[in-house]
Amino acid sequence: MKEKSNLFKWLLFIFFLFPALFFAQEVSGKMTDKVTGVPIAGGSVIIKGTSTGTSTDLDGNYSLIIDDFPVTIVYSYLGFTTQEIVVNSPSTVNVAMEESATSLNEVIVTGLASSTKRSNAANAVASVSAEELTGVTVQSGLDGALYGKFNGAEIKANSGAPGGGISMRLRGVTSIFGDQQPLFVVDGVYVDNSSIGLGNNIVSQAAGGGNPSSNQDDASNRIADIDPQDIESVEILKGASAAAIYGSRAAGGVVIIKTKRGKQGKPQVLFSQVIGLRSPTQLLGLRDYTQAQITALGGPNNPVLRDYEAELFDHTRVSSTTRFSTSGAKEDTDYFLGVTHRDEPGLVDNTGYNKSSVRLNVGQRFNDWLDLYVTTNYINSKSDRGFFNNGNANRTIGYALAFTYPWEDLSPVNGAYPQGGAGSNVLETVALTTNREEVNRFIGSAKTNVKLFTNDQNRVKLVLEGGFDQYTLRSTSIFPKALSYFRDPSSLGGVAISGSTINTNFNLSAFLVHDLNLDNGLNFTTQAGSFFQNFDRNTVITIATGLNGSQTNLGQSTNVSTQQVIRPAKDTGFFLQEEVNYQDKIIGTIGIRGDKSTNNGDANKMYYFPKANLAVNLAKFDFWSVDAINYLKPRIAYGESGRFSNFNDRFTLMNPQFIGGQSGLSPGNLRGNPNIDPERQKELEYGLDLGLFENRINLEVSFYNKVIDDLLINSQFPTSSGFTGLVVNGGELENKGVEIGLNGNVMQKEDFSWNASFKWWKNKSEVTRLDVPAFTTGGFAASLGTFLIQEGKSATQIVGTYDPSAYSAAEIAQRDPEGDGFFVYGNAEPDFQMSWFNEIKYKSFDFTFLWHWKKGGDNINLTTLLYDLAGTTWDYNDTGLDPSGQLSNGDYRASQAFVNPDPVIEDAGYLKLREVGLFYTLPDGLIKYANKIKVGVSGRNLINIFDYNSYDPEVSNFGNNVLANNVEVTPYPTSKFVNFHLNVNF
C-alpha cells in the first residue's frame, strides 16, 4: 500500500512538472559592452509586448523563463542602442551592446546620484559631446567652445583679450544685482568661476565716472582654466525645473561637466599638434580727413597720417597647442592621462595667454560591491591682458587711441616717449605697462559606490562623493614711473599693484540609492542623502604709488595701501527623490532639496526647493500604429531653485577711520539686513519630443515660464539714519521662452553621410512686481543710455534722456507716458537666436561647420561716442544718421552727446561662422605604429556679419556678473583664427 502511495506521488509530480518543463523553458546569457567587453550590470531584459523581464547581475548575467516560442526579447541599457532578438528555442543568448549614436539614448542627469536616457527625460537638458566641443577646431578655453551649441543661452565674450572672459545667461535675466552666471560642476566638484578685479582703477579712474563699479578691469573668469580637450560631455540644466537638485546655487542654471576616462581594450595613445594664426576680426580704419578738418583739430598742413590702430592691432600671431593623452582599462582598473600646453600670443604686443594642464583620472573596481573613481587636474596659466576698457584719465589703450590724432608722432626719442595729445601715449602704454594674471589651480574629486544589497529585483548602493577646488590667482599691474603721464611731480609717480587671491572650495555628499524592478514592469529609483559645501575666498590687493626710479618693488614706494576681501560661506542640506518608470512608457519624478547657508540672513533657516515631472512615451504603447513616428513624448516639469544673497548683504560693513588721532572704524553707507532671504526661482516647463523614420529625424520643442521672486534690490534708506541704502527682497521677475531643436540624419550611405542640427530659441523678460520706486542701473548715466527697472516692463529695456525741444507734446506723451524724463531706446534681449550645425563625411574627408545667428539685442556703444568727441571716428564724414540730413554721422552723434543717447544704442545682432573644419584621414599603414593619422585645417569666427559700429557686438565693459553686460567702452579687439591640425593615434 505504501509503495502504491509513493508511486502515485511520483506520477503526480511528473504530471505537473512535464508541462512546466515543456511550456516554461529558460533563455540565459550575458550582456557586455561591445567595444570594451566589460559586463553590463543592471541591463534590462524584457519579453517584447509584456511586463515579463529581468535585469542583469553584477557580472552581466541574466536568465529568463519563457512560456512559448518564438519570442522577441528586448535588451536595453542607458547610453546603448536597444536591441531586439528573436529567440526560437531555449538557448544561451549573449548580447554585445553598442553605444548609441542617437541622442535619445545618451545619459543625462536626473538626480544628484542618478541618471536616465534622454528618451525618458521630462526636461529639456542640453548636451554637448566631446566631438562637438573640440572636434572641429581647437578652443582657447571651455567658454569659447560652447558658442551656439545649445539653445536657451546667451553667451558673449567680454572682450578679445587672451585668456577668456565670458558672460553666460541661461533662459534670460535671472537677477538684477545678483550673480547671473550658472553653477559649474566638474566631476562632482563645485568649481569657482569668479571674475576678480585687478585694482587698476587707481590708474584708469574708471570708477570715477558715472558708474562706480570696480569690475571694469577686463578680468578673466576662472572657468577658462578648464581644458576643453579633457571633457567627455557637458550637460546644461537651463532652468529650475531641471536644476532644482542643486537648490540655492542653481538660479542661473547648472553646467555639469564630465571628463574622460579609460575604456576596455587596447591602450590608446593620442598626440595632436595645432598651429594657429590669429588676426583681428576687423579694423575700423582712419577718418577720411580733409585739410580743413585737420586744421580745425589743430593739425598741420599736408601731414603724413599714421594709422596707430593698425600699428597696435593689425598683426598675425602664431599660436600653438600641443596635446598628449593616453588611456585604457584592464578588467577592474581604468585610467586617463591628458596633458595640454597652449601658447597664444595676443594681437597687441606684450599680451598673450599661456596654459599648461595635466589631468589624471583613475578608476578601480575592488570587487563586486566596491569601486572608487578619482579625478585630478592641475592647471598653470599666465594671461597678459593689456590695459583696456573704460578709463576716465585717458590712460587705457583704447580710450587714449580715440583721442590720438594720426598726424602725431608718438615714437620714442632717445628712449623717451612723448606724452601725446591724448594725455597718454598708446605706444608707450603697450611697451611699458604690465597687466597680468597668473593662476595655479588644483581640482580633484573622489567617488565610491558601495553596493550594499542586490537580488533579482532590488539593488541598494551607497554613493560617497567629495570634491576639492583650490587656486591661487596672482595679479600684477605695473605702471612705471617712466610713463609720460607720471612725470609731473604732482602725479602718482608710478604705480605697482600686486593682487593675491586664494580660493578654496570643497564639497562632500553621501546618498543611498535603491533600485526596485517589479515583475509588472514598474521600476522605482529612490535616493536620499545629505551634503556639505564650504567656500572660502580671500583677496588681498596691495597698491604702491610713488615708485623709486625704475623700481617696481612695492617696498620701494612712497605710499602703500591694502584692500582685503574675505568671502566665506558654508552650505548644508539634504536631497530626496523618487523616480518611477513603467516600461519606459510613463516616467515620473518627484523630489525636494533643503538648503541652509551662512549667506542667508538666518543661517540656520532651511529653504526648500521641490521638483516634479512627468513624461509619456506614446509610441511605446500597443495602440500606437503610426509607423513613421517611432518616438513621441509629451512632457511637463516643475521645479524651484534659488540664489543666495551676496555675502555682504546681511552685514553692515565698517570703514577704517582716524578719530582723534586714533585708528577706528565707522559704518559704511550700506546697512546690513539680517532678514535677507535668497532669491527664489520657480519654473514650469512643458514640451514635446518627436522621432521620425527610426529616429533619423528628431524634433524637440520646449516652452517655459520662469518666475524669480524675492529679487535682491538695493533700496534707498533714510539718510538721517546714517545710511544711504539697504538690500531687500523687493520684486519679482518673469521670463517666458520657447526653444526648438531639430536633428536629422540627412543622408547615410556606405561612403557618405550628412548630419545636421538646427536650434532656435527666444526669451522675453518682464518685471512683474517692484516694491521700490523704479530705478536706473547698469550704465554710466541716463544721458548715455542705461537700464530702467520698472514694473510691467522688460528687465533689459534701455532708456535715456531726451531733448524736449526736439519733440511735440504729443510725441513726448506717447514715448514718456510716466513723465520720468526717459524714452525707451532699445532692449538688450535678442529677438531670437539660431544655430545651424552640419557634419558631412565622404570617404576619408570630414567637413563640419557651425553658423550662429543672433537677431536683435542692443548694445550701448560708447567707444564710437568717444571717437566722435575727439573727431577721429572712422565714419565721421559719412552721412545718413541725422534725420535732417544736414550733419555728418560724427557731427550728429557728437551733437546728441549727453542729451540723446539714441545714436549710441545700436543693434548688436550678428551672423557668425563660429567654426569650420576640413579634415582628411590618411590611409592605414602609412606610418609604422600609427593606427590613425588625421590632418586638417579649421577656423573660428572667420565670417562675421553685423552692422554694429565697432570691432564686435560681443563685448562687456562690466565683465560677466552684472545685468549690463552689453556696455562697450574701448575694449581689446576680437580675433579670428585659422588652425592647422595634425592628430595621430597610436
Image (tube, rainbow, N blue to C red):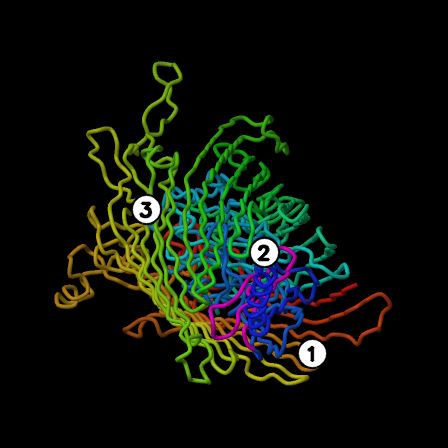
Residue at the spot of label 1? 845
Residue at the spot of label 2? 141
Q: Nearer the viewer, residue 861 or 421?
A: 861
At 31% from the left edge and 73% from the top edge, which residue is drawn?
Answer: 886
Give the mark, 2 or 1, whose residue is nearer the N terminus. Answer: 2
**First to last magenta residue range:** 43-68
Kind of residue sitting beneath label 2: Gly
Q: Which mark is residue 162?
A: none
Judged left or right of residue 457, residue 732 is left
Q: Position of residue 414 (x, y in %)?
A: 67, 45
Q: Nearer the viewer, residue 212 or 641?
A: 641
Q: Position of residue 360 (x, y in %)?
A: 68, 48
Judged left or right of residue 956, residue 4 is right
Element type where label 1 sits in the image: strand
At 28% from the left edge and 34% from the top edge, which residue is drawn?
Answer: 673
Q: Nearer the viewer, mark 3 or mark 2?
A: 3
